[in-house]
Amino acid sequence: MRSLRVLRTGAWILALFFLPWLAACGGLPPRHGPFLRGVWVPRWDFKTREDVERIVENCASLGFDHILFQVRGTADAFYRSDLEPWSDLLGGKDPGFDPLRTACERAHALGLRIHAWVNVVPGWRGTKPPSSKKHLFYTHPEWFLVGRDGKRQPLKPDYYVGLNVCLPEVRAHITAVMADIARRYDVDGIHLDYIRFLERKKGEDYPYDSRTLALYEKDTGLTPHMDPGRWNAWRRGCVNELVRGISRACRRVHPGVEISAAVIKRMDHAREVLFQDARFWAEKGWVDAVYPMNYERSDLERFASYCRETIRLRRYGVRVLEGIGVWLHDKNPSVAVKQIEIARREGADGVALFSYAALFPSAAPAEGLPDSKGMAGLREALKPFLCGIRP
């Protein structure tokens, strides 16, 4: 018995000595379970029920095990919602079917999981305003970002204007939308995209509306120019509070639902400039998985370095699935395969490919995607691996 006690004591001493060293060296828990294989399906890839069913069937045929299916792009809906209007991409009215419900039913019938993919912060995109007067653009113009000049962000032809998540009422609305999806649909997860401040041009900054400035002064006793670091931390805290609220609300109404986030691969830059603190969310347990958008055209070493950085989040108990931009590889599909192999070698829990329209024909493909020959080449290269056979 004395020998056993000595062994146990020695084991504890060794653990206390080595655990900090392992943490400092980036020691990670072993990956458990199968290597996961996901694909993003953007909102412009479907128009009809048949489109959605075909998308799910195509994804199953290529060996994916889950789909990130976009149901919110710009404070609009690709499902039946009482909180936000139907998207203009579906005609601004009920298309006669429910895309999200159709995707859930078909995916589950084929053994795939569906994650409802939502753009969180974007409020609109393009120079033409929304058609529906029920859109937040009209009902709550004060919820949109305001610059230093006191003016609302102008509409942009090729990028988003954003909602002001520094306002508690905006966070409450977004949280309610996410919880509504989790409560009413048989989704396996809620996938958060653009859960951060939007990119800003040099000299741009926001929000500087009177209500936000009053809230900031109430919390800190300061104005933004008095302590820029404190101003940044406060804004980052508002994003954190939104993630916390979404996570708690969705898990409350749908126990077991997975909360995941698409995150910028340069995590330090994202934290300091875009106020996306993925490490903090992982440490707090607010997300179950992160999808770093590790889009690289040809530099495999840089891809691997970002893998090593982002995969460190696994130490907090979250899964890390590396995002791969396959639309970049239609001329050289072997690069996409190599990137998947690197992600697996470095210890990722899986990969997600962006996006569906680089692999299969889309109802309304975006510019810059592969042609039919490029799609076929990507599918041919990827299918053996995605279906479980090493290429």
Image: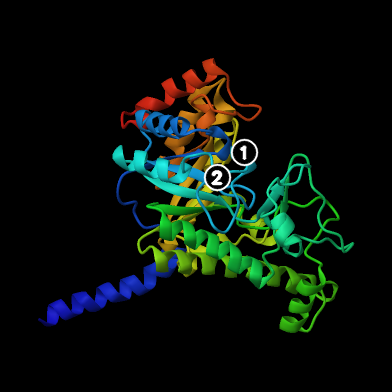
The tag earlier along the polypeptide, 2 or 1, is: 1
Q: Which mark is residue 91?
A: 1
Residue bearing mark 2:
305
292 up-or-down from 19: above or below: above
- Residue 233 occupies which quadrant of the picture? bottom right
Where disc 2 sits, the SS reads helix
The residues bearing labels 2 and 1 have C-alpha atoms spaced at a distance of 43 Å
Q: Position of residue 72 (x, y in %)?
A: 57, 49
Drawn side of residue 190 relative to residue 85, left or right: left
Mark 1 is surrounded, within 10 Å at the Cα level, by few (under 14), some (14 to 19) or many (20 or more) other residues, namely few
Going by the numbered disc 1, the residue's amino acid type is: Gly
Nearer-the-camera pick, 310 or 76 = 76
Q: Is residue 155 visible?
A: yes
Disc number lying in front (2 or 1): 1
Q: Position of residue 258 (x, y in %)?
A: 41, 57
Nearer-the-camera pick, 79 or 123 = 79
Figure colour scheme: rainbow
* Residue farthest toward the top in the current orientation of the protein: 373
* Residue farthest toward the right in the current orientation of the protein: 149
